[in-house]
Each structure stands twice: as structure tokens, then as C-alpha cells.
Image (cartoon, rainbow, N blue to C red):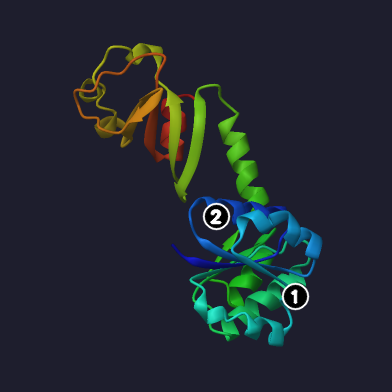
Amino acid sequence: MKNVLVIGAGRFGRYTCEKLHELGHQVMLVDKNEDRINKALEYVTSAEIGDSTDRTFMESLGVKDYDLCIVAIGDDFLSSLETTFLLEELGARKTVSRATSGSQEKFLLHNGADAVVFPERQLGSWTAIRFSSESIHNYIEVTDGYSIFELEIPKEWDGKRIGELDIRNKYNINILGVKNGKMDMNIGVDTVMRYGETMLVLGKTQSIQKLFYL
């Protein structure tokens, strides 16, 4: 369990709090707007109404005590930048800030952010890939160029063993699991593929797309 400080109670901040709560973490939420905070109270351990660009207010939060600080401000980049800078000055262990453009990312990284996220860009990319083929059931980008896809098992693979298909050696792609209602991750070369089931596949995004015509 981690102690997380989330600054900004808009939609992105609220959904972040909800997920952190679901994962069992302790969350402190900060925003200038009381109404926004009230909408997220069920997902946080505590909350404060205040201006995150005010140094005195930020000092009162005890920034050093949090394992992670998330700057979720989306409608005021200057405030986001000032908040990120203050967090670094006050000794934040790790700061993740929201951005909407590459130039914002550069400013944030230069002024204290350890990492930057692009919610709209990342969701847009996921939506485009996820729904561009009926064979794709889910998709996660692991790192630049590599992804995990949940895909329908091709009809031509029906009844064949994973070792027989040999796609790891042929295409440098790994089958991580097979799903028929429940996901079975205990697979090997003798696991038989069945048309109508789905599988988890890890590899280079381009290689997976080329192999499965996505």
C-alpha cells in the first residue's frame, strides 16, 4: 500500500483516485474547487481544499511523506507547471504530471516531473487499435514498440499445439495465455489452440499486426 497525493479533482484526477482506491492505496486529494472534491470523496482517505501553487499550503501537506504525487490538473497548464516545480522543491519522492502536448512535456520534465502522461493521446491510441479490428479484444502497450494483445485464435490454428505453430521462433512473438471464460496462463508447447477462444500475445506491435492482419 502506498500513500499518494493527487492534485486536481477533474475527471482524470477523479478516475485516478477511484483506481488507486480500488488497488488499496491511501489517497489524499487536493483541489481549489470544493464541488469537485465532493464528487471524489468516496475514493479518497482525506482531502484538502487549497491552491497547489501556494507554497505555504503545499508545505502544510507534508509532500515528503507521500510515495507518489500525481499532478492531474488539465485546464491550467501554468498551475500544473508551478505545482510540479513546487513538489520538487519541497522534496517529493516521485512526481507524475499530466500534459496535452510535447512542449508541455518538456517543460514539466525540466521543472521537476519524473514522468509525464497524456490521457487523451493514450486513450485515443488505445481506442484506434482496440476497435480497428474485430479480432482484438484488448490491448496494452508495454513499452515503446512492444504490446500485449488479447486476440481471437485464428481458425487455421484450431487443434494445433503451440510448439507446432512455432511462432516464437518464426516471428519473435510469445503466447502468454489462453482464455476460455477464464484465462489460463499455465501453457506450454503442448497446449492445444482452439478456434473460438482468445489468447494473450506479447511482442513487437508491428510484428503482431502483420502476422494477424490487424
Q: Is residue 151 above or below residue 194?
A: below
SS category of the residue bearing label 1 = loop
Mark 1 highlights which residue? 50
Q: In percent of the image, x 44 and y 26: which residue is there?
A: 151
Give the amino acid at mark 1. Answer: Gly
Q: Give coordinates of residue 11: x percent, y percent.
A: 71, 53
Quarter the N terminus occupies: bottom left
Q: Give coordinates of residue 24: x percent, y percent.
A: 48, 55
Q: Give coordinates of residue 148: x percent, y percent.
A: 43, 39
Q: In percent of the image, x 62 and y 37: which residue is there?
A: 127
Near mark 2 (Cα within 10 A), the count class, few <14, some 14-19 or many ≥20, is: some
Q: Give coordinates of residue 149: x percent, y percent.
A: 45, 34
How many numbered marks appear?
2
Asked if residue 119 lies left or right of residue 184, the reply is right
SS category of the residue bearing label 2 = helix
The circle on residue 9 is none
Cα separation, mark 1 vs mark 2, equals 22 Å
Mark 2 highlights which residue? 21
Q: In percent of the image, x 68 and y 76: which residue is there?
A: 83
Say whether disc 1 or disc 2 marks the residue closer to the N-terminus. 2
Q: Is residue 125 visible?
A: yes
Give the amino acid at mark 2. Answer: His
Q: In percent of the image, x 62 and y 79: which residue is there?
A: 61
